[in-house]
Amino acid sequence: MPTLRIATRQSPLARWQAEQVAAQLARTNSTLTPIICGFSTRGDKIQDTPLAKVGGKGLFVKELEVSLLQRTADIAVHSIKDMPVQLPAGLHLAAILPRENPLDALVSTQYAALAALPKDACVGTASLRRACQIRHRYPHLRIESLRGNVNTRLARLDAGDYAAIVLAAAGLHRLELAQRIRQYIPAADSLPAIGQGAIGVECRIDDQLTRQLLAALHDADTACCVTAERAMNRRLEGGCQVPIGGHAVWHNGQIWLRGLVGAVDGSRILRAEGYAPGSQAEALGRQVADALLAQGAAELLQAAC
């Protein structure tokens, strides 16, 4: 077997994810030599502007996908929540790994929960989705933008720039920083992002050998849930940067999908949910999206364009 070139972002969390994929592939095929290739994406370089103003989550994957299309890398490892719903022609998600804790997490040096934060306390987050839901549930709090990798954000918190920050629990777990978590925010208060907690491995559709190697890493249960979430997002998003949440879990042998669309200022939040067998994950995503659109989600989507 030849070497397998793995494209990843340079952040500590991204490299951890790539190293996990490399280790799992090496275990399944002892003759394989995985090589990790680090890239600095445009999303990593732009740190002083909210993502919604410069192009959104796709900024974290474009350089990695170009490396696949130019055949300078064989696979790319992503946090699925950072991936746009439409992939470039010729690429696909070949493997989705078992999901980590998908919830948002509150980190603070002083306060044990969002409900404990006093009036006008400053909460840092780079996510419109998180900001919208926190503003809706806790209108007395002040939300400020916070960009950077996990360690950078924690350093800003420890320096006293924020009373609390909100991060993905999965990233803190993977970096062995779970002790910093003060509260796992319930999904009812902060519905997770599409694909949050799941790692995806992207490759070229025509690369049959690599697809066969990745099949050993694929988790079908997680994939069904992520498929439903991404189908909902695909139906809704249309390229605009708006607060959209979606989370699917297995419940009594079916997929239970909850979806959310909100106004950026938190003044309005629409919710919908549905159940379906795993074989109907795509249809379930569209069904929940249609229920949101029937409540007026299109107005919120258009307002953000």
Image (spheres, rainbow, N blue to C red):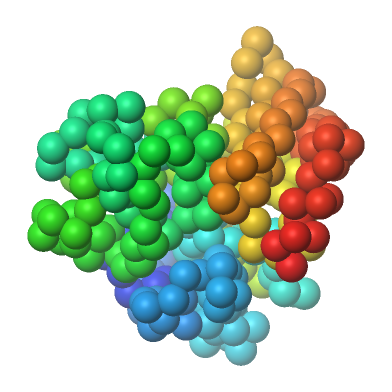
Q: x and y percent of residue 122 in the render? A: 29, 50
At x 65%, y 48%, the residue is 263
**Camera-nearest residue between 196 and 55:** 55
Up the image or down, 140 lies above or below 144; here it is above
At x 65%, y 56%, the residue is 242
Left or right, residue 285 beside residue 5: right
Up the image or down, 9 lies above or below 277; here it is below
> Is residue 150 visible in this depiction of the protein?
yes
Q: x and y percent of residue 197 in the render? A: 45, 43
Up the image or down, 136 lies above or below 203; here it is above
Q: x and y percent of residue 26 in the render? A: 37, 57
At x 63%, y 16%, the residue is 251
> Is residue 166 visible in this depiction of the protein?
no
Left or right, residue 267 beside residue 126: right
Q: x and y percent of residue 95 in the render? A: 58, 52
Left or right, residue 254 beside residue 96: right
Up the image or down, 228 lies above or below 203; here it is above
**Camera-nearest residue between 165 and 60:** 165
**Camera-nearest residue between 144 and 147:** 144
